[in-house]
Amino acid sequence: MFRALASVLLCCFFLEASFWVHFSYGDLTTCSGIVPMTERGDKISITDFGGVGDGQTLNTIAFRKAIYRIQHLRRRGGTLLFVPSGVYLTDSFNLTSHMTLYLARGAVIKATQDTSNWPLIAPLPSYGRGRECPGGRYMSFIHGDGLEDVVITGENGTIDGQGDIWWNMWRQRTLQFTRPSLVELVNSRGMVISNVIFRNSPFWNIHPVYCSDVVIRYVTIVAPPDSPNTDGIDPDSSSNVCIEDSFISTGDDLVAVKSGWDEYGIAYGRPSSYITVRRVTGSTPFAGVAVGSETSGGVENVLAENINLYNSGVGVHIKTNIGRGGVIKNITVSELFMENVRTGIKVAGDTGDHPDNNFNPNALPYVKDLTLKNIWGVNVQRAGWMHGIENATFTGICLSNVTLQGTTGPRPPSWNCDAIRGAAIEVSPRPCAELASVEQSGSCASHS
């Protein structure tokens, strides 16, 4: 049933995306111009290096040979690696700078399910250890570190992580190291990911970390709703990230902005900033738009707008915890529609675990200047849950033109608030008293 529903949604999404491209592109606001698409003069095919798309032949050597050729010949303007229609089974592999990985229609790059030879890499310094297990972590299926000018695109070909074997290891508590992401780009800049389907990631799907100037557009990301920790897109200690015009349906947050974990993130000190999320549709048992909970380097200047969510756990979730430190500020969510959602808006200061017992309980996060405006929800079980932290009240929360209708029944959805301060204008149902601050109503009025 999941596959049938996903197929229908994918079809609808591509029709809608096609409409945007051919008929309304000139009228749309877009941030995608921060990284222009590169036309490659040099083109090679994976079949030139022995690639066989029969779904059984292991193509690891073919991919590594092709990318080695791109890396060492250094053609002017870079090289396009073409993957024709077919199913190309492979181990994980590294990208290189100045390359385009191009998946033709019907092309599938499929991860092997042999986990015994999966390479291990060091933990991210802002995390101090693997996110799930102490020590190192499994390298992402498609990986890049210290790169520039890399494009992953095509004609809606598929990158398939075959994650079920990893999900079962997680469920059975047999993991030795943290599961691999589907695509992870580290310390890189000038990256474009577009017109590709990402399916069944073992862990997080697309993870740009310590990156700048990243465009992710016209992608489809799908995984079963019970697949653990299959976040859609997680910008992490990264800046100038543009996420637009995409469909995401996974088992965890659709988009989650992060910046490191407790004392390790504080020491590394690299925030996520200038993140734009626009025209994203999807469903998840967790959050549609999230910040956190790993926010120790700080998160600022995030804009999410024109978001459509259905059958989801939370519409917007700002989450952190004691020991995190960091500042979360200037977060704006606008033009959000949600249907069949458990909680419309959640802001929580008690969410997320710790890497070890060395975190500083006095390292309190500071959350301020959250603007949530022009939000509409139907069949919302609980309007909002906003709990800050004692001695670190979350301030500057502005709700403007927010209507959250409940399910059929005698009582409307409720608000629950503590240790927060802000203002509300034209909000239904009536919000909690903490959102009726007279001194903050002026700044909120400017957002109405």
Image (cartoon, helix red, strand yellow):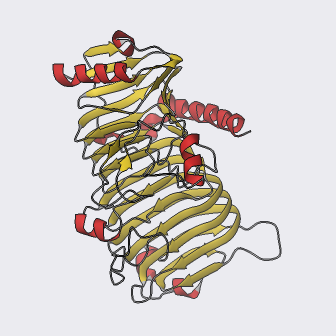
Residue 447 in view, yes or no: no
User: Residue 208 placed where, x, y %?
Assistant: 35, 47
Does 71 sit above or below residue 123? above
Q: Nearer the viewer, residue 128 or 25?
A: 128
Residue 15 falls in which quadrant of the image? top right
Does 114 sit above or below residue 244? above
Q: Nearer the viewer, residue 84 or 361?
A: 361
User: Residue 37 placed where, x, y %?
Assistant: 31, 30
Residue for point 55% across, 70% down: 346
Q: Nearer the viewer, residue 259 or 327?
A: 259
Residue 441 in view, yes or no: yes
Position of residue 67 in the picture relative to residue 423 (left or right): left
Residue for point 67% across, 77% down: 414
Which quadrant: the N terminus?
Answer: top right
User: Residue 99 placed where, x, y %?
Assistant: 28, 27
Residue for point 58% across, 41% down: 164
Position of residue 272 in the picture relative to residue 15 (left or right): left
Residue for point 59% across, 53% down: 172
